[in-house]
Image: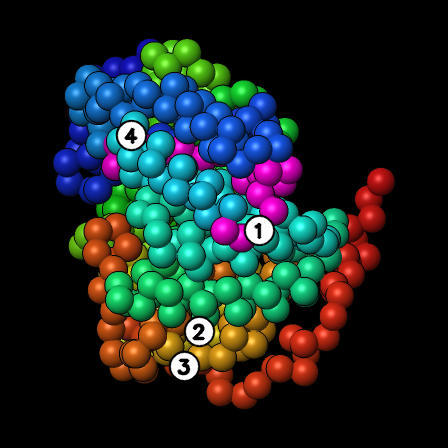
Amino acid sequence: MINIGEVIETNQMVERENLDVRTITLGISLLDCADADCGRLNEKIYNKITSLAKDLVKTGEAIENNYCIPIVNKRISVTPIAVVGGSACRSPEDFVTVAKTMDQAAKEVGVNFIGGYSALVSKGMTAADENLIRSIPQALKVTDVGCISAYLGSTKTGINMDAVRLMGEIIKETAEATKENDSLGCAKLVVFCNAPDDNPFMAGAFHGVTEAEAVINVGVSGPGVVKTALEKVRGESFEVLCETIKKTAFKVTRVGQLVAQEASKRLNVPFGIIDLSLAPTPAVGDSVADILCEIGLEHAGAPGTTAALALLNDQVKKGGIMASSYVGGLSGAFIPVSEDQGMINAVTDGALSLEKLEAMTCVCSVGLDMIAVPGTTKATTISGIIADEMAIGMINQKTTAVRLIPVVGKGIGETVEFGGLLGYAPIMPVNPFGCDAFVNRRGRIPAPVHSFKN
């Protein structure tokens, strides 16, 4: 039973502490849309998305009105398109037609983003995988709400360095193709190691091939709620600190559980998972970096940052799994630069570097996220950064990701404005020394010895 005190407390979280349901994401299997003809493939994809998702937005809005809980985004994820389109799409241009179809379908049903224009290439690339990857710059140029991902490595398979090298080139081409919008296309493009099949957060969401025909996944976010709770226990022991984070994460997850179950019932679609990720926004008071400062740091990036982030991430997960049996996705703490005002301030004040961010990704829930770098950054340097992050994920058996934005025409010290939830970002310096000979080796980095657990 929910008592009146809990209702009042939740209302305060929403009104004063930026608690929101960041996304309701409808995952849709497109496996039955596969066809040898590109025209029929696109027709099947459009019809299936628009039929299954036709009530998603109005259902989300009705739940918002009924429970007074903001639901910021309504999104769709689909089966990786390299799998679905392999028979019909024989060139990058063919795959671009599918990207356009997905974009049109998403706009028709009114969602904010659609993900799943993806390739899973952690061990090797099929012809379809490579064609999709080579289509990415054009696909992001001609679409508005499509998000793209590539799965380049895992603990079980190692790292596909051929794909890592190619993605460095593709990110540069995407930056150039969308340079009129400050290389915005790169903000909708992410690469993963150990990507989960049920992630509701963009740009990396896709509907895994082991998932049901359709499923509802919900992502909840509450950095402001956690920070406010910690303000009440300043100077207390680590035990009190950890208990406070756990209890707060429990309450936030219960809000997500309520929304997920209600959306599942109204849409007649099975409930999948709750992703409890502390995903910040540019709004004041909605910052993971501010939580780290409340724990006791002068700035995110100061000595102790990685330990504080590890503590935060672990307690969030512990609180979440007590509140729901189906916590999944990425669940933890995101540390994007452009979407977190506290992180932006830390970079601007010189407290936070790209190298420190990389160290923090060893313990956060994703990786190097929404980081703007000079447009002159070499493709091989981008591939080297990706390889480093994939290695952290592979060795530590965790999800890691890279979303770098080489902003064409801008350099260190300048800023780039993305708008909305994406915020703005200072252009961060990149290590000037090269890694060309390393990146240009062929093949893959083998899986680590601890991957052999059968």
Cα distance between the residues tagged 1 and 3: 29 Å
Q: Name the front one of labels 1 and 2.
A: 1
For residue 80, side relative to residue 171 (left or right): right
Question: Badge 2: few (under 14), some or many (20 or more) residues near its Cα, within 10 Å?
Answer: some
Q: Earlier in the sequence, mark 1 or mark 3?
A: 1
Label whose residue precedes the other's in the sequence (4 or 2): 4
The local secondary structure at tag 2 comes to helix
- Residue furthest to the bottom in view is 433
Please state which of the two labelled residues, at mark 1 or mark 3, is closer to the viewer.
1
Dot 4 alpha-carbon crowd within 10 angstroms: few under 14, some 14 to 19, many 20 or more: some
The residue that disc 4 covers is 108
Q: Which residues are magenta?
A: 71-93
Amino acid at pointer 1: Ser
Residue under label 2, please give it: 354
Q: Is residue 217 left or right of residue 391?
A: left
User: Is label 4 in a helix, a strand or a loop?
Assistant: helix
Mark positioned earlier in the residue sequence (4 or 3): 4
Secondary-structure class at tag 1:
loop
Q: Position of residue 56 (x, y in %)?
A: 32, 23
Q: Nearer the viewer, mark 2 or mark 3?
A: 3
Compared with residue 141, is residue 175 higher up or lower down, i.e. above or below? Answer: below
Residue occupying the point 42% across, 23% down: 47
* Pair 4/1: label in front: 1
> Looking at the image, which is closer to me, 189 or 136?
136
For label 1, the residue is: 91
Where does the image place residue 213, in percent across and percent down from the top left? Answer: 54, 20
- In the rendered image, residue 316 lying in the magenta stretch gets the answer no
